[in-house]
Amino acid sequence: MPLRLRGLALICASLCALSCNRSSAKRIAFIPKGQAHIFWQSVHAGAIAAMRETTGFEVIWNGPASETDYTGQIKIMDAAINQHVDAICLAPIDKKILVSLVEHAAAVNLPVIIFDSSVDTETFTAQVATDNYQGGRMAGKRLGPAEIEDVLLELPGVSEAAAIGVDDAAKGQMLVVFVVASRLGLLEADILQSIDSHVQMRLGKLYRPGRVHFVQRLPKTRTAKVMRRVIRGAYCGLPLGDISSLDDPGTIDEIRRVAVPPDTGATQPATER
């Protein structure tokens, strides 16, 4: 975070150099959404670090006490414009309420850099933000079923593992894993607990399995490759497709058995989040 905000401050400094020929230090007003949260404190630290590393500009840091105080942010923004600062870096609390002030700043040739959140106008000078959608796509590519399975196989109680995503009415998607326990005599309850804590530690809470099933065997090809497509089809009641390469058709029945809802008498242990 500090590195990103250093870049933001440097952008502001460059804009000031282009828009103003005064020889005195350029004043950059940073207006965050709030002051108390560690996120804004890291933003502040990054801006100060950039100021110390680059001569010729001064950071003026001022934000509302809370991230819901849009009235306070309006007053701070208005004061910065009236003080004729050289540039403003603004993290808008509300994308509509700050529009008139951003447009007013543009009208008086005052550069405004929007960061963290958007604003419903195109009159700002630049915008610095993360692309959460693209970030999610990249994370999905980099952290797929194989990566989750590798983490599960780090546990001494897990001999084999398979991970699939299934539709869930509450969450949209739920991670379901199938585990073949190792022959160490560990209780399934202990393995479940270790899976939960280990996955959370290695990958984060987001990747904790919504359900864990213990099976004797996993559907595999004759070359020992786990057939996730077949597992998902059998578990969700979907067409299995081509299973000509399946080594043991009996493994499909085992997946179907654990897919039976708990209230119908199924005895296979599972955890739900």
Image (tube, rainbow, N blue to C red):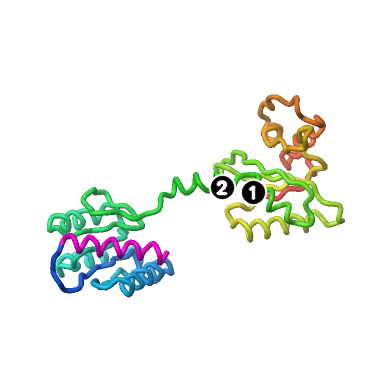
Residue 207 picture location, percent across and down? 60, 52
Q: Relative to residue 181, is residue 137 drawn left or right?
A: left
- Which element carries disc 1, helix, strand or loop? helix
Q: Is residue 257 visible?
A: no
Disc 1 marks which residue?
147
Q: Is residue 111 magenta?
A: no
Q: From this view, report whether residue 229 is shown above or below residue 159.
A: above
Query: Dot 2 surroundings within 10 Å: few (below 14), some, or many (20 or more)?
Result: few
Look at the numbered discs 2 and 1 and tell me whether their residues touch, using CB distance below 8 Å. yes
Label 1: few (<14), some (14–19) or many (≥20) C-alpha neighbours in 10 Å: few
Against 62, residue 131 (above or below) is above
- What distance separates the C-alpha of mark 2 from that of mark 1? 8 Å
Q: Which residue is mark 2?
A: 142
Q: Quadrant of residue 56?
A: bottom left
Q: Residue at x 44, y 46 (%)?
A: 133
Residue 25 percent location from the top left of the image = 20, 73
Q: Amino acid at mark 1?
A: Glu
Q: Which residues are magenta?
A: 1-19
Instruction: Specify the quadrant that holds the N terminus.
Output: bottom left
Residue at 78% over, 56% down: 189
Q: Residue at x 81, y 50 (%)?
A: 181
Q: Quadrant of residue 70?
A: bottom left
Q: Position of residue 78 (x, y in %)?
A: 19, 64
Q: Is residue 187 left or right of residue 7?
A: right
Q: Residue at x 75, y 56 (%)?
A: 155
Kind of residue at badge 2: Arg
Give me the disc on residue 248.
none
- Majority secondary structure in the magenta region: helix
Q: Earlier in the sequence, mark 2 or mark 1?
A: 2
x, y percentage for residue 227? 71, 35
- Quick check: can you spot residue 271? yes
